[in-house]
Image: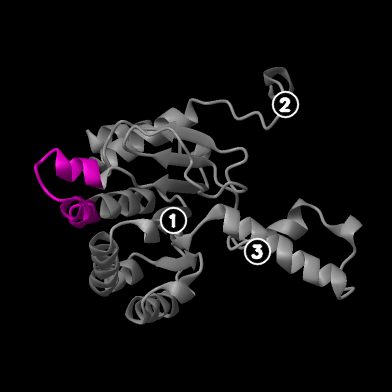
Amino acid sequence: MQEELKKLINKDKLPKHVAVIMDGNGRWAKSRGEERTFGHKNAINAVRNVINACNEIHIPYLTLYTFSSENWNRPKDEVDTLMSLLSETLLLEAEEIFTKGLRMHVVGDISELPELVRDQLLNVIELTKNNTKGNLILALNYGSQKEILKAVKELCVEVENGEIKVEDIDEKVFENHLYTKDFPPVDLMIRTSGEVRISNFLLWQIAYAELQFLDVLWPDFTKETFFRCIIDYQNKERRYGMTSEQLS
């Protein structure tokens, strides 16, 4: 089925940037009578599935909402498990990411992450910095409102210092102060678990993205699921504020 679906994908209409809110690990675990941490441990295959699917059809940018700035408010044992899993996954998957030709990036404030995790992230970023076959972006300790406030404060300082005039601030100037300044805007945002909300994720960057909310819990996410999302995306008309008649 995966190969059949892949054949239906129009390679000329692929999204350039896909972002994923990986939700539903806790509910997946509870439905099996397990603790929430069991769901996080079983979510790694879904991460591999979406990375491999993007790699196979050559989508150049994939952003995964890995840990939000609000996730620190979760129970300590769950946060500790998430950090431990992140450390373990980086250690195990670094060579695979490199071999696939992917370049890894991080958006968010990684200064607050445990030192071991931060060092491993920087090692993988350094290892893959010359790769050109795709970009894997991890949103870690990321919150879009904080990102936007950071950009505003930086611009205020530049105005105060006479480096820029207020009237010169436009969308491009503003975007240059976001974590994502080196990436294109998001074309497709996918959220699993049936929840219909954005959860403080890439609020500026998804301004004209197609949004898909799936009933699938994240640990059950497959390459087939992803290919169906791409086909659905390609059946949409992206108008960017224009009319259908203008586009045709």
Segment tinted magenta in the rendering = 26-45
Colouring used for the render:
one colour
Q: Residue at x 56, y 38 (%)?
A: 209
Q: Is mark 3 on a helix, strand or loop?
A: helix
Residue that numbered label 3 is attached to: 150
CA neighbours of label 2 inside 10 A, class few (<14), some (14 to 19), many (20+): few
Label 3 vs 1, first from the N-terminus? 1
CA neighbours of label 3 inside 10 A, class few (<14), some (14 to 19), many (20+): some
Question: Which of the two discs, 2 and 1, sits closer to the camera?
Answer: 1
Q: Is residue 36 highlighted in magenta?
A: yes
Q: Residue 242 carries which label?
A: 2
Label 3 vs 2, first from the N-terminus? 3
Residue that numbered label 1 is attached to: 70
Q: In which quarter of the image is the N terminus?
A: top left
Mark 2 and mark 1: Cα distance apart in space = 36 Å
Q: Provide residue 232's location: percent of width, then percent of height.
A: 42, 28
Q: Is residue 98 highlighted in magenta?
A: no
Q: Is residue 58 above or below residue 197?
A: below
Magenta span: helix, strand or loop, mainly? helix
Q: Provide residue 83's location: percent of width, then percent of height.
A: 30, 68
Question: Which of the two discs, 3 and 2, sits closer to the camera?
Answer: 3
Disc 3 marks a residue whose amino acid type is Lys
The quarter of the displayed image where residue 222 is located: top left
Residue 191 as seen in the image, left or right of residue 14: left
